[in-house]
Structures are given as structure tokens and as C-alpha cells.
């Protein structure tokens, strides 16, 4: 594969943002489609209980994976800054540190997850008839955490150079394997939720291995030398400083979703199955939103490293405008085809009806989420991750948990529960915009004093 790094420091912004973000969005969407294949296969060939078993694990898996995805953003920002500074030695240190750090972290999460998997599912109030399959799925999935984390850090390394195409190609290859193994394990061998979990682990192993090989074969600053893989404390500190708050910010969504999933589980297996199916559709729009947030992080990161502050501001404005516009269009299209898409997972009219309720409350206000992602992403590009993380924690997690124990408790219906999504997004987006404007004002004043 020919390597071609994107010049983020010069030229037009809009077309490069699109060239960066769209393959990244496609990567997330395809990843989710392959995950949705897990639910679709067990839903069609095993039954609603198996479908609910896989779906009930989504918040837990999201919590574990999103934490390290956020930390991987730290590596992205640091490499981007070094790229803008043309600091080749710094780039190499981050690359080799990231590889080992991801593997160590993945093993640690696997061990911890295996210990607390059963208590976590009990905490989520997973029904007794679903619990055994849900536990088997989670424990097998956890075995793949080291390679899942490795893939995300490898992807972050490629993204720091503007290359979002290579991770996409690797994902397509591994995703095809995932679908094939799903059908083999479930339809041929006769496995249920454990079969699709095993298929996911093996396909993730392939995608991370492919990216590893490509890093070894690179000819530029991000080339991986196996003998040089070690932790460099000088670069690990900024990776964690930027990445940990970003990881906590993404985990906030998963923490609040665990609370909401527990409330959903209390409404029965039909609502569980419907919500799981809808989640696997609506998340496609989120990956689009998130891709532009990551674009703003990477572009701002490189230009900030090069000292091009005015261009950083333009990047934020352009990215925000594009993100809102595209998200509104895509969300409308997904909602328009909501019923036939839900029927792919399960043809039960009641499941489809409940699923449409969730899709409506998530997709219609999805553009508000776009504001949150770009504001947070831009501040991370400057190296400031803590403030957006705190705002998101209070605005998203705080509001949603409070809602579950107040509004939902007073009126325990699925409709009541879904209202919390647009409410929490709107409040958080408004505060993030204010925080960004204050940050830029203070940043400008500090720069003026220093010059």
C-alpha cells in the first residue's frame, strides 16, 4: 500500500477535513455494522433471548473500550504536535510507547473484567433467562481486549499523519472474517452468543495484526521497530495527561448508558431487544459525529504544534459547520428507513415499534451532539482535555443518572427514559460552547502577554 501523509498545515481546510473524517466515520460505521451482525445472526437463528444477551453487554463493552479509545487520542495529539514541530525523535518515542502501553492496558482490563463480569451483569439487572448467555458472551469478548486496544492505538498513530484509509481497509478485511465466523459458529456449529463473541475476538486479532505489519513496513517517522518497543516516560506523561481525561469523557457516556441500560432491562426482554437493535442503527450517526471531533483534534494538534493559531480557529469553525450539516442529513435518512432496518434484527412488530421510539429521540437531536464533539475535540488539540471531560461528566452522566432516579422512577416507561438524551446533549453542548469561547479568549490574552 502506498503511504501518503496529509498536509494539514497548508492549503484548504474543508476538503481535507472531509478526506480525513469520512474514512474514519466509515471505519466506525463498519465496525458497528459488524457488531450488529452479531446481534442480527443470533436474533434470526437463535432467538430474542440471545439477541438480548449480546445487546445487554453493549454498555459494559463500550465503557471498557471507550476508555482506551480516549487515551489513544492522547497519542494522536502528541504525535500531531510533534509532527507540526517536525520532532522526528519525539514521534518515534510515542509510537513505540503506545504499542507496549496498549498491550499492557489491554491485559489489565481483561483480568479485571473477568473478575467483575458477573457482578456487573447483576448490577445491570440482566434477567435470569438471559444471564448465562450474557455472561458467556462478555467473558469471551474480554479475552480480546489486548488486541482491541492495540488496534485503537495503531489507528491513532495512522490518524496523526492524516491516514484514516489504512485502518479502514484493515477493518473491512477483519469484518468480512467476523461475519463468516458468525455464520460458521452459530449456523453450522450450533453455538449462540458465545459463538459471535469468539468471532469478534478472532477478527479483532486479524485487524490489529494487519496494522502492526503495516507500521513495521512504513518508511517514515511512524515506522515501528520491534526491538525498540518500550515505554518512554517522557512521552507517556503527555499521552496520559491528554488521553486520560479524553478517555474519561468517552467513558462518561458509557457509564450513563450502563445506568440507562439497567432501567431498560427492568422493562423486559422485548424492550431490551428493541433498544439493542435501535442502538446498533443509531450509533452509525454517532460515528459520523465523532469522526469530525477527531478530525478537529488532529488538525488543531498539528497546527498548534506549528504555531498556526489562526488556522486552528478556522479549523474549528469549518469542522463544526460541516459536522452539523452532514449529521442532520444522515440522521434523517437513517430515521426514514428505521422500520425496515429494525426488521433485519427482528421482525416482531412490538420490537420494531419500541425501536422507532428510541431512534426518534436519538437521531432528531443528533446535530447537537456534533457541537459537543467538535468543541471537545478542538480543546484536546490544544492539549486541554480536563475541562471538556468535567463538563461532559456533569452534563451527560449527572443529568442522565439523576433522570433515571427521578423522572423515570416516577413514570417508568421507555418514552420517559428516552427524553433524557436530547435534554443532556443540549445542556452539555451549551456549556461546552461557552467553555471553548472562554478558553480561546484566555488563550489569546496569554499569547499577547508572552509576545
Image: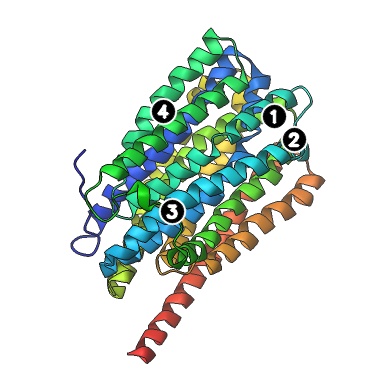
Residue positioned 78% across, 52% down in the render: 406
Residue depicted at x 42% and y 76%: 440
Within 10 Å of the Cα at label 4, are there few (<14), some (14-19), or many (20+) other Cα atoms?
Answer: many
Foreground mark, 2 or 3, reads 3
Please say if the residues under marks 1 and 4 sit with CB atoms less than 8 Å apart.
Answer: no
Q: Quadrant of the N terminus?
A: top left
User: Relative to residue 208, is residue 337 depicted above or below?
Assistant: above
Q: Is residue 408 above or below residue 231?
A: above
- For marks 4 and 3, give the CA distance: 24 Å
Measure the C-alpha gap from mark 1 to mark 4.
Answer: 24 Å
Cα distance between the residues tagged 4 and 2: 28 Å
C-beta proximity under 8 Å, tags 2 and 1? yes
Q: Sequence order check: which comes first, mark 4 or mark 3?
A: 3
Q: Is 310 or 223 nearer to us in this picture?
A: 223
**Residue at point 19%, 41% (across, down):** 2
Q: CA distance from mark 1 to mark 3?
A: 31 Å
Q: How would you rate the neighbour count of disc 2 (Cα within 10 Å): few for under 14, some for 14-19, many for 20 or more?
A: some
- Please name the residue that numbered disc 3 is placed on: 98
SS for callout 4: helix
Residue 414 as seen in the image, left or right of residue 1: right
**In the rendered structure, which disc, 1 or 3, sits on the residue that comes first in sequence?**
3
- Disc nearest the viewer among 4 and 3: 3
Residue 329: where, in percent of width, then height?
Answer: 38, 43
Say what secondary structure mark 3 lies in.
Answer: helix
Q: Residue at x 52, y 50 (%)?
A: 68
Q: Circle 1 — which element?
A: helix
Q: Horizontally, is 164 left or right of 150 in the view? A: left
State if disc 2 and disc 4 touch (CB < 8 Å): no
The residue that mark 1 highlights is: 135
| Disc on res. 175 | 4
Amino acid at each position: 500500500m502506498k503511504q501518503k501523509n496529509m498536509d494539514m498545515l497548508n492549503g484548504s481546510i474543508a476538503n481535507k477535513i472531509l478526506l480525513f473524517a469520512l474514512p474514519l466515520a466509515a471505519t466506525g460505521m463498519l465496525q458497528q455494522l459488524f457488531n450488529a451482525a452479531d446481534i442480527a445472526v443470533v436474533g434470526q437463528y437463535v432467538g430474542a433471548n440471545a439477541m438480548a444477551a449480546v445487546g445487554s453487554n453493549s454498555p459494559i463493552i463500550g465503557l471498557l473500550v471507550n476508555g482506551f479509545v480516549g487515551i489513544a487520542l492522547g497519542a494522536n495529539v502528541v504525535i500531531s504536535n510533534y509532527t507540526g514541530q517536525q520532532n522526528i525523535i519525539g514521534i518515534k518515542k510515542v509510537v513505540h510507547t503506545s504499542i507496549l502501553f496498549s498491550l499492557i492496558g489491554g491485559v489489565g482490563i481483561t483480568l479485571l473484567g473477568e473478575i467483575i463480569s458477573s457482578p456487573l451483569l447483576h448490577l445491570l439487572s440482566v434477567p435470569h433467562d438471559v444471564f448465562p448467555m450474557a455472561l458467556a458472551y462478555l467473558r469471551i469478548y474480554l479475552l480480546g481486549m489486548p488486541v482491541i486496544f492495540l488496534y485503537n492505538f495503531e489507528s491513532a498513530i495512522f490518524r496523526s499523519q492524516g491516514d484514516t484509509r489504512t485502518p479502514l481497509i484493515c477493518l473491512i478485511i477483519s469484518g468480512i472474517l467476523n461475519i463468516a465466523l458468525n455464520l460458521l459458529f452459530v449456523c453450522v456449529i450450533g453455538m449462540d452468543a458465545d459463538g459471535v463473541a469468539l468471532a469478534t475476538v478472532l477478527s479483532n486479532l486479524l485487524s490489529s495484526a494487519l496494522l502492526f505489519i503495516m507500521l513495521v513496513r512504513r518508511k517514515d517517522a511512524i515506522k515501528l521497530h520491534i526491538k525498540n518497543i518500550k515505554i518512554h516516560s517522557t512521552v507517556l506523561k503527555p499521552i496520559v495527561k491528554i488521553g486520560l481525561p479524553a478517555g474519561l469523557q468517552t467513558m462518561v457516556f458509557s457509564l450513563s448508558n450502563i445506568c440507562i441500560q439497567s432501567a431498560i432491562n427492568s422493562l423486559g426482554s422485548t424492550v431490551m431487544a428493541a433498544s439493542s437493535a435501535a442502538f446498533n442503527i443509531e450509533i452509525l450517526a454517532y460515528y459520523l459525529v465523532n469522526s469530525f471531533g477527531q478530525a478537529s483534534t488532529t488538525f488543531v494538534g498539528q497546527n498548534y504544534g506549528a504555531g498556526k493559531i489562526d488556522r486552528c480557529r478556522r479549523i474549528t469553525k469549518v469542522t463544526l459547520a460541516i459536522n452539523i450539516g452532514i449529521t442532520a442529513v444522515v440522521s434523517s435518512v437513517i430515521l426514514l428507513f428505521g422500520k425496515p432496518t429494525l426488521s433485519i434484527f427482528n421482525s416482531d412488530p412490538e420490537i420494531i415499534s419500541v425501536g422507532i421510539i428510541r431512534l426518534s429521540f436519538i437521531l432528531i437531536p443528533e446535530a447537537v451532539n456534533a457541537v459537543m464533539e467538535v468543541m471537545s475535540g478542538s480543546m484536546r488539540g490544544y492539549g486541554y482535555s480536563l475541562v471538556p471531560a468535567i463538563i461532559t461528566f456533569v452534563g451527560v452522566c449527572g443529568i442522565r443518572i439523576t433522570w433515571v432516579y427521578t423522572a423515570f422512577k416516577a413514570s417508568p416507561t421507555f418514552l420517559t427514559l428516552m427524553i433524557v438524551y436530547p435534554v443532556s446533549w443540549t445542556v452539555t453542548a451549551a456549556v461546552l460552547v461557552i467553555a471553548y469561547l472562554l478558553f480561546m479568549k484566555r488563550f489569546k490574552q496569554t499569547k499577547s502577554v508572552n509576545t
